[in-house]
Image (cartoon, coloured by chain):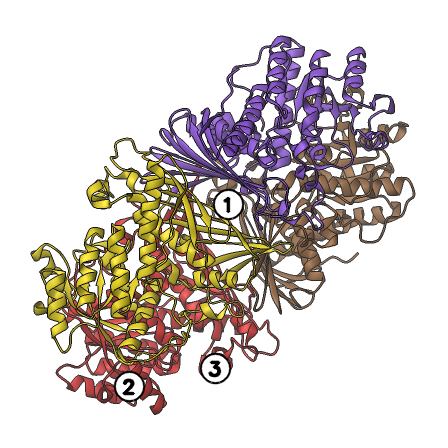
Chain colours: A brown, B red, C yellow, D purple
Amino acid sequence: MTAYPKATRKLRLGFVGGGNGGLVGEWHARGVHLSNRWDIVAGALSSDPVKAKESAKDWFIAPERSYADAVSMAKAEAARPDGIDAVAICTPNHLHHSAAKAFLAAGIDVICDKPLTNEINEAVELVDLQKKTGLVFGVTHPYAAHMMVRQAKAIIARGDIGEVRQVHVEYLQEWVASADGEFSKGALWRQDRAKVGRSSIVGDIGTHAFHLASFVTGLAISEVRADFHTCTPQRPVEDTAFLNLRYGNGAQGTMILTQVAPGNFCGLRLRVFGSTGGLMWDQEKQEYLHLSRFGKAEEVQVRAQPGVMLPEAARMTHLPAGHSEAISDAWGNLYTEFAIAIDARRHGRTLPAGLLDYPTVVDGARGVFFVHATADSHEAGGVWRPCWFTP
Amino acid sequence: MTAYPKATRKLRLGFVGGGNGGLVGEWHARGVHLSNRWDIVAGALSSDPVKAKESAKDWFIAPERSYADAVSMAKAEAARPDGIDAVAICTPNHLHHSAAKAFLAAGIDVICDKPLTNEINEAVELVDLQKKTGLVFGVTHPYAAHMMVRQAKAIIARGDIGEVRQVHVEYLQEWVASADGEFSKGALWRQDRAKVGRSSIVGDIGTHAFHLASFVTGLAISEVRADFHTCTPQRPVEDTAFLNLRYGNGAQGTMILTQVAPGNFCGLRLRVFGSTGGLMWDQEKQEYLHLSRFGKAEEVQVRAQPGVMLPEAARMTHLPAGHSEAISDAWGNLYTEFAIAIDARRHGRTLPAGLLDYPTVVDGARGVFFVHATADSHEAGGVWRPCWFTP
Amino acid sequence: MTAYPKATRKLRLGFVGGGNGGLVGEWHARGVHLSNRWDIVAGALSSDPVKAKESAKDWFIAPERSYADAVSMAKAEAARPDGIDAVAICTPNHLHHSAAKAFLAAGIDVICDKPLTNEINEAVELVDLQKKTGLVFGVTHPYAAHMMVRQAKAIIARGDIGEVRQVHVEYLQEWVASADGEFSKGALWRQDRAKVGRSSIVGDIGTHAFHLASFVTGLAISEVRADFHTCTPQRPVEDTAFLNLRYGNGAQGTMILTQVAPGNFCGLRLRVFGSTGGLMWDQEKQEYLHLSRFGKAEEVQVRAQPGVMLPEAARMTHLPAGHSEAISDAWGNLYTEFAIAIDARRHGRTLPAGLLDYPTVVDGARGVFFVHATADSHEAGGVWRPCWFTP
Amino acid sequence: MTAYPKATRKLRLGFVGGGNGGLVGEWHARGVHLSNRWDIVAGALSSDPVKAKESAKDWFIAPERSYADAVSMAKAEAARPDGIDAVAICTPNHLHHSAAKAFLAAGIDVICDKPLTNEINEAVELVDLQKKTGLVFGVTHPYAAHMMVRQAKAIIARGDIGEVRQVHVEYLQEWVASADGEFSKGALWRQDRAKVGRSSIVGDIGTHAFHLASFVTGLAISEVRADFHTCTPQRPVEDTAFLNLRYGNGAQGTMILTQVAPGNFCGLRLRVFGSTGGLMWDQEKQEYLHLSRFGKAEEVQVRAQPGVMLPEAARMTHLPAGHSEAISDAWGNLYTEFAIAIDARRHGRTLPAGLLDYPTVVDGARGVFFVHATADSHEAGGVWRPCWFTP
């Protein structure tokens, strides 16, 4: 049912980071597998050489293509006739920049987890390098690759809810609150200011919420004002942020981010109110888009429902309505779009305008600017700060 | 099933305002009727004498007890041997103060709609008068009289979610956005700054949200910071407010208020996150209370469910679980509690501590302080302002 | 907001049964109070004289109008110049017939709980008596008096879902399963075949489901086939029934009735599927009607939503959308319709066709025929039986 | 996070049927890809040679391993040193038997779509052949491979809802009703009695519902009684079936199957009521399991929620709670279990008891018996028929 163009061949993919049974690698890998457009053939899967080797075996990577680090991997793979077409970078945040730089330098297309970098100058450098090299540079905000998010974007773009006037987005989790217990191992490095950068919470989940709000509305987010809170007293860094946002068209918004809200797992919810209607999408119930228009009953649009999907969404249908496509499928769409873009670039083909809509290095850089703006605002007592990056 | 004490006799109630088929009077009246503890026997139901007379007839009030205004009604009823036991004030806001004052002066117990007054000094004066006279003075925040809100309060008081750390409350409506259309008549006076006081939106629905948050958590709300917005450009006053709140125990919170959110009718939703659990209540699905605790599945408590209700809630059971009690029933509870309090005062009986939990003149005054604090904050560019009133 | 005609005076109502804090009386009384069209002035509230007297006092009934039984009450009230206009009969089922007969004979309008009678000949006799006397005879199926059920009926009548082809209705409760515990007192008499008639479960909740299905679809239910089950082994009577139904137009249906389904309180749910659409209504979430049409997103209609309600439903709006009207409000509608009918009859006025749509003695008799048909079918091994009564 | 044993190598898989962009192949393929335990290396993807070739190219299958039919494929692959380890059979139903037989004869493990066969004797023959050869024979009921279905099964097995007394399962779809329109191509062959066997609706979706009910409860389904209906008059075969079921332990149940219910896509819902509790699972909201126990609030268990999952379910965790695993992930689990079983068999390893719980050829045969029993019952006017197969 999907209307994506077919692959001409399977592309060769390498991973930097992602090994050891970690969650980030698992997510990327599920997308890679589902897209069925990639073979994973190389990796620097861990900074620990033993774990790197073990993980490579688990991933069915040949031992000679399991590397100690990103730089040597970039060099070696670039030299092979069957070298990787692209690299997926899933390391901790502070290592994204150097890895991405190495692969761009080697002429290899890059797929990078978010936040793009910890520092602004690093982000800008990657934007410049991508521009100079012309390579594909994708950033993994998977929510925007779910069919119903594309549907939401298309609905707003058509004007079905009128002029956008309010945007409310929240991302609520609980896991940091329980970090002394059994579910907590992943929480530890996020308590170290040196590693998390300017804001743990905004970098981790705020960048997703920020991207989603901007992606769906098609609007720049011009200014932000932020209060950070540490609701779990024993924590050294913020676990909660309340933000107010100003959008490029004059719309106003809020953003609530917290990782200490018991009963919430990945509660990313978006509500957009316009002059004639509103819509709501909840990541945890991702199959449904709620559309309201004045004087009409609320519509509950179901993914892939016949007669309801707009073309921008319909092309990523894999399963009929009633059988959920979820986060694995969204990752699959993301890796499909990356593959199509890279396949086209490598074969010198031009794609129809508007066929792909994946997050780029510029979107990644916007996330980095956003993290810094929120931290600046908070430190200045909650004053308004500009937060939008225009390359 | 209710465990409220029985009435010794039906009390006599008068209304100031509420006639003409208006919504406010209908709500009060439904509570009065359902409680079955009152006879409505007098009224100054409208400032328009013709409408006052017509409304009195519709309400089965004898013509000689239909009055032109609150002051003459207070005087005349106080002089009758069968005069009213209490008055319900449902006028527009700016008339609350003078009416309440007149009835307090006449020794008649008062039930008043919110916001208590438009001005702070008026509110303080009513607090003082109530104290001096010892009369019952109830304010009508009906949400707090729903069984599941009482259950929520009792759960938090027992410590079931630990120390309260975050409180998020929102009240979303759509009707102001459509005010040029057919649903809009009620919107007109709310566009007149002279009538609405410092904030249309905060006075109208913000006071409910404020009372609910404080009532359920048992916490003072010490400071507020506010941004007002006018999302419908043609409106002369704010239709939206985004607030940040600081609670007395150090908890942090947000409040989103808007009347221009298409698809939202009376979307009052409360979420409280504590150190070990969280809870959620949605006014539009008022029968359900969602309780989460770390490491346990979410509990969905249903109103009146056997084995689940705590005593503070259980005493207001009228119907078994599965048959909803809604806003009419909550108004009925409110008027039941008012009746019990007034009946006891008039007969010199002392009620068991904790039997009643209705909003008082002090709660009403707190709402007025809150409205002013939010307007002060907004006008000063969103700075923090103290907002709690302690008599 | 309601468009019902105004009352010319309050009508005088008497109760037979309903005292002692029982649930049935509470429900009727809430409807009576909310409608604000009745004064309760007489009663034979209990067969136990002490309880009758106590209950009368609680209900503010004058001692001389508290009667020992229905027959003496009918006679005495008929003789008073200020005698009751109507009687509400809330006794156990086997006493409905004799009470109703007495009041009809005395020229007093009758409102009777369901099932109308235990025996078919009794039901037919009441139908005949009503016809002969021309008195109003209402039967209390309150679900059909909820605004969204009226909306559902109007939607189908307009043809919005095409020809009705399938009707699925279920009514699931849990309370009988726990009848050895604290919630069980009401369960005891329902275990006595002599008192419950041919079927405990069908008489108690099946008649509601049957009426609802026929009311909303506008269709006769021509045949039934039934299996009764006793899922709680220690019970002497059936607690569960699975039915198949044939509708007058050839549509097919199912009905699941059980009172031993843990987690279900009053789970009355109706789904109707037509040739071009379908709809769903759940009594426990009574504010919402779900309407689906081929090739369109599901509509969630909210009670009283501007622009959405059809006239047949709109006239019973009391509160705006977002503030639920629930079972108390539906009982209020029922007693409002009874009052309008009785007021008109007593004053010789003719009402506009289609203004009222309350269940009559014929609907009550259909319920009795249905109970017998299901029991006949079950006892014969689940064969098809005709079940529709045409007077 | 998954606790499945690691693969020792990727297994080689062939497909019979599934090409041409059909839905069945897509589903199987998504499971194969996500499991990351298989390489698809051979296929007879279509009976149309042109389409077979094209599909093979799309699936990256070498041309020389694209076969014209199942028999020649079985023979050729068995002869290769690098021949397939297993075959996945996704043809129309009537071709399952001959294909499965050919691969069993060739010593190749079999994975077969449902219903296993159209005829009873064919099913029994496959059961016998599997027994004789000792090969792995899996049948693809993917719902039973979702983590929350495993959780439901484990909860019942632990006795958390007491003795099972009622089982209600329904599978509602809409697509056949719209078969003259644009969404209908798949509907055509299902209207041909020669191809669909005894029952179109029971074979297509009833076998899933039947397997699910038996799988979760751990009970045999001993007898059935069925009414088939054709609700869309122009259809030549049944599109609806209402069933009553008797379970091995005396529990009673219902099953509603229809493909002409507007607004329903893949509405497979299971409710089990026991002596002390009940549970509910809805395939369209597959992440949630609703568990009720007397006197306690309903629990909403979320997939992968810390502290809540039982070991039988926990081992198939891939993603943390809040990011849905859906039908693709369930297919992934299914193909993971098949791979583990086949890997173990081929390497002579014994797996821990209870590690795997995939549907076998015996489960498949039970589905075939069930289809026949329902058709027998219907044709005999709805009499009870035995329906359980014991090998």
Report the amino acid beneath label 3. Trp
- Asked whether residue D248 is in view, the answer is yes
Work out whether mark 2 precedes mark 3 in sequence or the reverse, and give the earlier one. 2
Disc 1/disc 3 C-alpha distance (Å)? 41 Å
Return the residue at label 3. Answer: B189
Return the residue at label 2. Answer: B70
Q: Closest to the observer: B81 or A246?
A: B81
Chain on which label 3 sits: B
Mark 1 or mark 3, whichever is nearer to me: 3
Helix, strand or loop at disc 2? helix
On the image, the x and y values in percent for residue B111 come to 28, 74
On the image, the x and y values in percent for residue C306 come to 51, 70
Chain on which label 1 sits: A
Report the amino acid beneath label 2. Ala
Helix, strand or loop at disc 3? helix
The quadrant in which residue B268 appears is bottom left
Marker disc for residue A390: none
